[in-house]
Amino acid sequence: MLVVTGGGLSGCDYWPPALQTQIEQLKTELQTVTMERDQLQSQLSAATKAREELQARVDELTRANREKTAVIATLEHSLAAERQKLAKLTKTSTVRAATKTTALSAGKTASAKKKTVRSSGAKRN
């Protein structure tokens, strides 16, 4: 329990040497702690600023990533559509080529038969 006497508040000029030493030590510790606190606040401010800058960079990269993902999805969709077109064209070309080959083969066979018939007829004359 703290008892404050009227004499302690009235301006007593006598301070015992041990008390004066203790007060000086406390003042020195207070100054040291105040400087450390200021340094820590400065470091905290710097760390907060760095965090905000990094967060802004993360947000920017996240936005860029979303944009690139959308572009990639569009390109993949276009590629799939082009592959389907190519597959259809390849099937159509294969069918047409097979039809032409069959028609040409049939035409060559008919021509060969005609030549054979003509050759045979020429020999008969």
Image (cartoon, grey):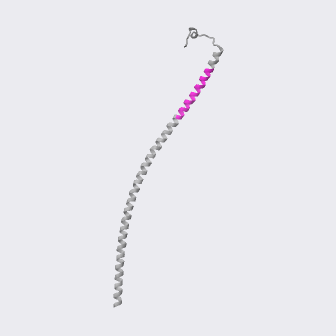
Q: Is residue 107 above or below residue 57?
A: below
Our reading of the magenta stretch's main secondary structure is helix
Counting the numbered discs, the total is 0
Q: Residue at x 50, y 38 (%)?
A: 53
**Residue 84, quarter of the rendered image:** bottom left
Q: Is residue 33 above or below residue 101?
A: above
Q: Is residue 110 above or below residue 57?
A: below
112 horizontally vs 28: left or right: left
Magenta span contains residue 106: no
Residue 73 is situated, as x and y percent measured from the top left of the image, at 41, 51
The extreme right residue here reads 17
112 horizontally vs 1: left or right: left
**Residue 30, quarter of the rendered image:** top right
Residue 15 is situated, as x and y percent measured from the top left of the image, at 63, 13
- Residues drawn in magenta: 25-47
Q: Is residue 91 above or below residue 53?
A: below
Q: Residue at x 37, y 70 (%)?
A: 98
Quarter of the figure with the C terminus: bottom left
